[in-house]
Image (tube, rainbow, N blue to C red):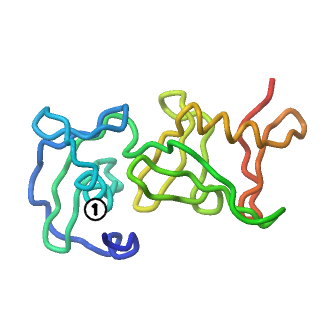
Amino acid sequence: MPDPTALASWSPELSGEIDIRILADGSWTHEGSPIQREGLVRVFASLLRREPDGQYYLLTPAEKWRIQVERHALLAIDCERTGDNGEGVWQVLLNTGGRCRIGGEYTLHSAGRDGEPYVELPNGLTAQITRSAWYRLLDAAELEDGRAFIFSGGDKVILGATD
């Protein structure tokens, strides 16, 4: 699988559009049929980038294919905290098997365009945080001035108001 920084540097010309769609529930389809092979979905996810035009593309160094995404490219299906005390880092586990830290350049948003929380990922992607993962974050949250927050890698990450 390509390194996300390598993917960011690829700039092939548009090859066209391919009938691949990522549905709101995180499943992938090709020509209307579900893609059943998890390994294939993982490979596709590793080649996915959202560009400034808001469109999603599968890329290789030589090809660029536009695909459709209903809501978010990925789902954050769980989260965990690694490390000790204030140095701990919260990570989300993605439905494609990857992990991404919360905080720093990967901003957490408590209410997105669809009202659901999500986290920003590399290459312009976002992952909707599932209800169970969100509740896990809220359960670990600290409260201050009517707001819930966590610390991740030294960053104070606001989860939202508690009222």
Q: Position of residue 97 (x, y in %)?
A: 42, 55
Q: Position of residue 31 (x, y in %)?
A: 10, 37
Identify residue for label 1.
Answer: 47
Q: What residue sits 77% from the left and 43% below the top?
A: 140
Q: What residue sits 29% from the left and 40% below the top?
A: 69
Q: What residue sits 40% from the left and 45% below the top?
A: 74
| Quadrant housing the C terminus | top right
Residue 78 lies in quadrant: top right
Disc 1: CA contacts within 10 A as few (<14), some (14-19) or many (>=20):
many
Determine whether, in the image, residue 123 is placed left or right of residue 147. left
| Quadrant housing the N terminus | bottom left
Q: Position of residue 63 (x, y in %)?
A: 14, 66
Amino acid at circle 1: Leu
Q: What residue sits 14% from the left and 41% below the top?
A: 30
Can you say whether 144 is above or below 39 in the image? above
Q: Secondary structure at mark 1?
A: loop
Tag count: 1
